[in-house]
Structures are given as structure tokens and as C-alpha cells.
Image (spheres, rainbow, N blue to C red):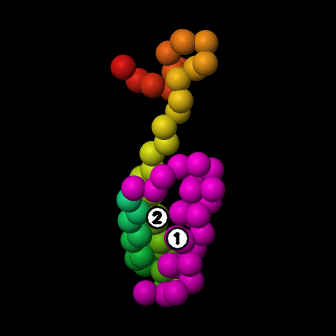
Amino acid sequence: MHEDVLEEQRDLIEQVQDAGWEVTESELSVYESPWEDAGEPEATVTITARKVFPEAEDGEDNPFRVR
């Protein structure tokens, strides 16, 4: 696998973490597109992350929580 693809994945994960998210899973797929004639590989990165949003100080429910 190309080192530059792995470096791009690391950069994306770092950006997500810098935004306060905890990365729990990352998947990288590298493939050649059947629709492009260039023959250059493409990559897809799937990042799963979680972030805890504290309760509102006025005692209201967190608007980001799905119940």
C-alpha cells in the first residue's frame, strides 16, 4: 500500500481527534476505479468516532442526545 495513502488517513484521524472526537474505528480501502481510465488508485476512508456532550448547565436535556 502506498505510504502517502496511509499518511492521508492519519491526517484525517488527527483532524477528527483535534476537534474533540474519540476515534473508535477506521477503515481504509484502496482500489482502482472501474470508471476511470487513469489507472491510478483511489481510496475511501471510513472513520467512526464518538464524542460526549455534557448536560446543559441549566438542567435542560442535551439537544444532541437522541432518545
Viewer-closest of 42 and 13: 13
Answer few, some or many: residues within 10 Å of disc 1's Cα (few below 14, many 20 plus, some between 14 and 19): many
Badge 1 vs badge 2, beta-carbon distance below 8 Å = yes
Viewer-closest of 10 and 5: 10
8 is within the stretch colored magenta: yes
What amino acid type is highlighted by mark number 2? Answer: Val
Answer few, some or many: residues within 10 Å of disc 2's Cα (few below 14, many 20 plus, some between 14 and 19): some
Residue at figure coordinates x 54%, y 12% from the top left? 60
Q: Give the range drawn in magenta.
A: 1-24
Q: How far is disc 1 from disc 2 in space, using C-alphas?
A: 7 Å
Which mark is on residue 45?
2
Image coordinates of residue 24 in percent, x first then y, are 39, 56
What amino acid type is highlighted by mark number 1? Answer: Gln
Q: Give the mark nearer the N terminus: 1 vs 2.
A: 1
Q: Is residue 37 visible?
A: no
Viewer-closest of 22 and 57: 57
At mark 1, the secondary structure is helix
